[in-house]
Amino acid sequence: MAASNATGFFDLPTEIRNVIYNLALRHEKSLQLDSYPPKPPKVVNYDYAQHITLLYGDERDRYPPPPPPTPYLNASLLQVSRQVYDEAVPILYGANTFAFSAMYRASESLLHTFLQRIGTSRKHLRHIKILEIHNYATLRSALHLLKEAKHLDSFECSSNVLRKLTKTSNVKSFIPWLKTLQKTASADQERKGALDILTTNSHEEPSMAAFYGQESSDRILLERQEQRSQVMAKLAKDLA
């Protein structure tokens, strides 16, 4: 009997397998983690323009369209084999941005639970977004786990988080974690500095003028810039 010439998945070059993993597991938009069990997003079909017209009349152009549905991640590929798992996990956690927001649980609690559950895979994380903070003790515990993410590139906070960080006691919650990042950066000149990793988002800024008017929008943005400068000055002082 002639030998089979069939090529299996693991006969492919590593570069090709990585392309496949990226296509299956990587999303351009943030992966939103909330307090609901993961499931595909439901899209409600209705005439958004008509809805806005009924509510706001001729002012409907001031209101931006609804955001697209949050991408749904199907990671069942990781269950194929141990080798697939080992090769794909760094891409799953390293190539995606994980955003934490919740209606019924605080964002920092969701972050803490997520970091606990993924275990040693924490080391692959590159991008985190957090939209609200209520309990700073839980945040400190989450950031302690996040110290294992030695290659983290961004920890993005919302403007609400930034506003709360103007309180010195809240800012101090970040210090132990930032000191770890700073130590890593000192050992590797190609790594970002600790304060370059901690960022604030600006996704809502383009539409602020539509809601508040240009003058009010400019004032709010200026206040946020001042808040960020104030927070960064406090952090830089504690890290010095």
Image: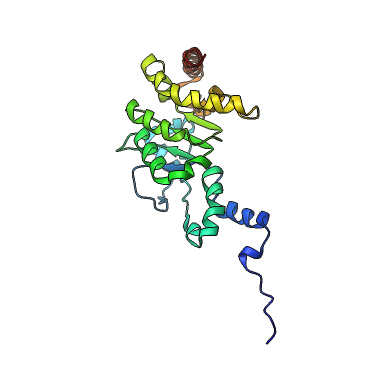
Residue 10, quarter of picture: bottom right
Q: At x 51% / y 59%, what residue is drawn?
A: 82
Q: Nearer the viewer, residue 119 or 129?
A: 119
Residue 191, quarter of picture: top right
Above or below 88: residue 142: above
Above or below 48: residue 129: above
Q: Position of residue 127 (x, y in %)?
A: 52, 36
Q: Position of residue 116 (x, y in %)?
A: 39, 42
Q: At x 68% / y 81%, what residue is drawn?
A: 3
Q: Nearer the viewer, residue 181 or 99?
A: 181
Q: At x 32% / y 37%, what residue is drawn?
A: 103
How many marks do you count on the picture? 0
**Residue that lies at the very extreme toward the front in this rendered image:** 187
**Residue that lies at the very extreme toward the bottom in this rendered image:** 1
Q: Is residue 68 visible?
A: no
Q: At x 49% / y 19%, what residue is drawn?
A: 217
The N terminus lies in quadrant: bottom right
Q: Nearer the viewer, residue 182 or 131?
A: 182
Q: Position of residue 213 (x, y in %)?
A: 48, 20
Q: Position of residue 88 (x, y in %)?
A: 55, 53
| Left or right side of 58 for 138 | left
Q: Is residue 120 visible?
A: yes
| Left or right side of 109 for 32 | right
Residue 49, quarter of picture: top left
Above or below 91: residue 196: above
Q: How is the image coloured?
A: rainbow
